[in-house]
Amino acid sequence: MDNKQALSKQQGFVITMLVIGISTLGVLATVSVDRWEETSQGTEFHNVQSAVIAMMVDNNINTIPNPITIATNDMGAYPDAATPATAKGLSAGEKGGYLLYGHDKVADGETWPTANYISFAKTIWTYTIYKDGTVVQGARIRSIDEKAKGGGD
């Protein structure tokens, strides 16, 4: 075998190893992203569940009076945007509903200040809720990148 053939075989071997290495990195990156997304989904679900519990305890309610049945990612309308302010012990001009974001719980004749039981107005996944406060997570409707950039909040 002359030097030209040996050099050609060596170059072919290097290229093959590069392709295998890049392919392996691609597979590892895909697995990592999937695991991160699963973790993100579980974390958001836990945050929504915890916020519902805190809101129910803080407002001394054992059930959600008018639970939302259409899946939403708007925490300013979740879990109950239909209860009138007067049913919460507030005056008619105040903000009604039991909400995780922008909840009015002070009988001061104003719609502000509000309490936020969760730190974001929009979630990545959608949610519904049962009257007893059981949270149900639905479909992902926003990208995680959009959430990280603060899009839609």
Image (cartoon, helix red, strand yellow):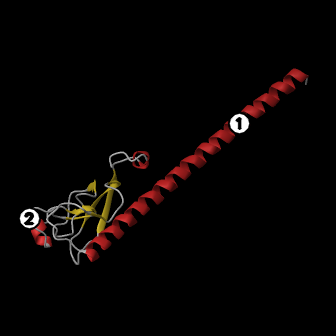
Q: Is residue 113 left or right of residue 36?
A: left
Identify the residue at image location x=28%, y=71%. Answer: 55
Nearer the observer, 48 or 99 = 99
Picture mark count: 2
In which quadrant of the rendered view does residue 72 lie? Answer: bottom left
Identify the residue at image location x=47%, y=59%. Answer: 39
Q: Residues within 10 Å of mark 1 (few under 14, many from 20)?
A: few
Q: Is residue 13 left or right of residue 42?
A: right
When the figure is inspected, residue 140 is found, relative to residue 1, above or below; the finding is below
Image mark for residue 18: 1
Q: Earlier in the sequence, mark 2 or mark 1?
A: 1
Q: Residues within 10 Å of mark 2 (few under 14, many from 20)?
A: few
Image mark for residue 144: none
Image mark for residue 92: 2
Outermost residue to the right: 2
In which quadrant of the rendered view does residue 96 lie? Answer: bottom left
Q: Position of residue 89 (x, y in %)?
A: 13, 73
Q: Position of residue 85 (x, y in %)?
A: 13, 66
Q: Residues at badges 2 and 1 in contact (C-beta under 8 Å)? A: no
- Label 2 sits on a secondary structure element that is loop
Task: Kindly identify the amino acid type of the residue bearing the numbered disc 1.
Answer: Leu
When the figure is inspected, residue 2 is found, relative to residue 120, above or below; the finding is above
Q: Quadrant of the N terminus?
A: top right
Q: Position of residue 32 (x, y in %)?
A: 55, 52
Identify the residue at image location x=13%, y=69%. Answer: 90
- Label 1 sits on a secondary structure element that is helix
